[in-house]
Amino acid sequence: MENIDLSKFEEEERPIDIKYYITKYSRYWPLYLTCIAIGLVAVFLFHRYTVEQYQVKGSIMIKRSLSPEVRILDRSQIFSGNNNLENDILLFTSKNLAEEALKKLHFDVSYYAATHIKEIEMYENSPIRIEVDWEFPQNLQGMVHLSILSEDTYMLSREETSFMDYLSAKASVGEEDILGKIFSFGETVHTSKFKFKAHLVNPNRVGDMVGFKIHHPSTLVDNYAKSVTVRPQNNYGSVLEVSMVSTVVEKGRDYVNALMDSFLEYDLKEKNRISENTLAFIDDQLFLVEDSLKSVERRMQNFKVSNKLLDVNKEFGGLLTRIESLEETIQGFEFELAYYRSLEQYLSDKGNDYSEVVAPSLVGVSDLLLNGLVQNLVQLSLERRKLLSVVKPNHPDVAQLDQQIDRLRENVFENIQNLVQNTENRKGEIYEKLRSYDHQFANLPEAESNYTHIFREFKLRENLYTYLLEKRAEAGIAKASNVPDNAILDYAKKGNLIYPKKPQNYGMAVGLGFMVPLAFLLMYHYLNNRIVDQVQLKSFLKIPLLSTVGFSTKDTNLIVAEHPRSLVSESFRSLRSALFYIASEKKCKTILVTSSVSGEGKTFVALNLASAMALSGKKTCLIGMDLRKPKVSQYMGVSNKKGLSSLLVGTASPEEVVQATKYENLYIVPSGPVPPNPAELLLKDRLKDFLNGLKEQFDVVVLDTPPVGLVSETMDLLRFSDVNLYIVRQNYTHKKHLLMINDLYSSNHVSDFFAVFNGFKGGGDIYDYGGYTYGYGYNYSYMKKNKYTGNYYEEEGELQSSFIQKWISKLNK
């Protein structure tokens, strides 16, 4: 066989027929519906057995800001933002703050409803409460079930669902087994590994079973510190959004709110630390001044009694008052200098933690610049301490704060030196005035002079004591009036379901339920190398499609003869009409039937086509020219001892091989015994003479020939035919088998060739791509029985409808 040039058969680019694909794949709607239903059921079961997770969130505003003095003296703060939100975010996720929040809550025990569907935590709805003694080591692992027997008693048990659960229960309980025993509510359950009490909260739940788990505080702190997510609500504001994911909305809500409250308490505690240090300093000074004041008071009283002095102020009041005023001023300078030196010494000794510095305004030092610098130094120290609670000292943010603190400390040192020098100068001036008054006082009598010295010392101690009391009251008021710099904007109230996402999952189930079978069908049809429908056949075949023959479900191959009112018989009548139209000028029409390979139904078509011709009154002869695999005699029920091969070898006459059948106008020439050289026999002139003789006797001659793609003799038989039918079978004929007939047709080696689509199974109510084809007859469309065909084809009523078809029919009524 010569090589076939495949380039001739490359299909021209054609527009995609959307209607074709919609019709083709919409026929599989039961498959789509089944897959969608399976997907929806699977999603429903997934939701039913999955523990739901909710996101709860609150918001807090950060309002800390540095004073103008710091922004002026620290150039790095002039153009930077006022808020350091990163430090606050780290504080929210720190274990220290998580521990403070958990102290407000009863999270050390979790309570669960007894259910086999999924784990449901009861939280506030639990009918019991477990009081754990954390001073005792707790080693109760896994879940323990508590059955409420009555309002006074209960029993503990476990449900081991696996071997590992059984081993865990044994390892937890140990030798002192408490499972299966009855205890009283309020009674201490004490073993070597745990100690707790159970309390009944809701007496109406007698008979229920509740599971509980005991969590160690350190484990809780680790888990909850990791579970919180903190982020700014926007890029320009100072509001932080605090959120977490929880299986119980109320539990997550309580923790987020407790965490935000603990954050404010931490902030307030750091602010109160300054006031507490001030109060401690003043109390120490008051203790010393009070002792000296009492001592001076006793001396003055004894002196007045022993020297009989009644009213010293009347005699020396003016001079004494001026001296006392100057001494009070000197005492104030001494107090300020002591504070300056103490502050300077404190800043020199400490590293970078100045959070305990006493502010100047709290001890009566009224210098505004120094007061602002010290306050901001304390503020930066507090920020550093907060940052060190969550990061290491070598963190870049800590290094940045250290640089700011160092610059601010140098500014404080410089300011202290200036204040000390100014205070010393003013103190020297007051001493000069005091010496002049002392010179005047020296001229007084000795007793009065001694008394005056004692009285001056008393007044000095008294004024200092009164001053410290005032400052102590001011510091207490300042501490009581402290409020957090930050504020909670929104407490966590409700939760948003984030897992599972039910609407998305149901939508995905519908989408996948449709797309997965569609993708499977597309892949199947793409990889399928067989012809599946008429449109595909027309796209691969270059010869005209003359007719479509439906698939036969009958037990016989003589459909037209034995079931003339069936749908398949009607398809052959359609083919008969088309052939009459094509070869209308021929007195005797010779029709050759062939195919690509064996099994495509060429003998079935030839047999029923001959029967259809005979039913129309045409005297028809069917010749079995497939000498290699004769089947015509078997289908017709006649003897194959003498046939065409016998005629061609000269052992039988034409009258002997032409046999009448039981059907009117239908005759048959069997193939005869299988010869050793069928190709050479069909080349003899005797075949030509025999066929010419038949054309004189019959109106139609049908030639059942071998497959054109397997044997060579079929090409030699084309010279005897008027019309050639090429049989293509649905879901059987390979696309590559059509290359040969296309090559022959394109190269004009064959003519008068027409295709017949055999064994077609229509889908849906109507599966029609027919109409008139290439100007020759029409394509018969295989239609199932429906409300339009009614009972026109009565014999098709024997077909049993499927359950789905019956169900759809009921819905359509």
Image (tube, rainbow, N blue to C red):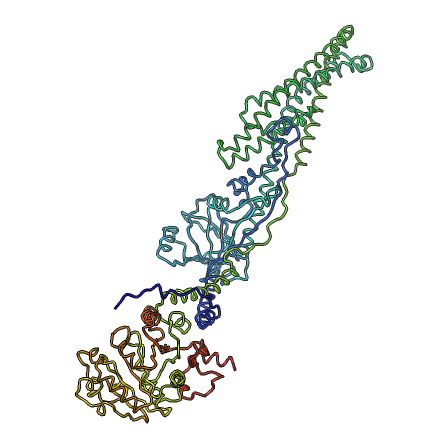
Seen from the viewer's position, the closer of residues 307 and 500 is 500
Q: Is residue 614 above or below residue 433?
A: below
**Residue farthest right in this picture:** 314
- Tell me residue 552's x, y (percent): 36, 82
- The residue at 42%/50% (across/down) is 140
- Tell me residue 617's x, y (percent): 36, 92
Seen from the viewer's position, the closer of residues 420 and 743 is 743
Seen from the viewer's position, the closer of residues 775 and 42 is 775
User: Is 649 positioned to the left or the right of 265 in the image?
Assistant: left
User: Is 221 positioned to the left or the right of 593 in the image?
Assistant: right
Asked whether the viewer can see residue 475, the reply is yes
- Tell me residue 92's x, y (percent): 55, 42
Q: Is residue 204 above or below residue 673?
A: above
Q: Quadrant of residue 362?
A: top right
**Residue farthest top in this picture:** 443
- Tell me residue 678's x, y (percent): 20, 79
Please give the count of numbered marks on the rendered protein.
0
User: Is 438 positioned to the left or the right of 396 in the image?
Assistant: right
Instruction: Name the quarter where the N terminus is drawn.
Output: bottom left
Asked whether the viewer can see residue 767, the reply is no
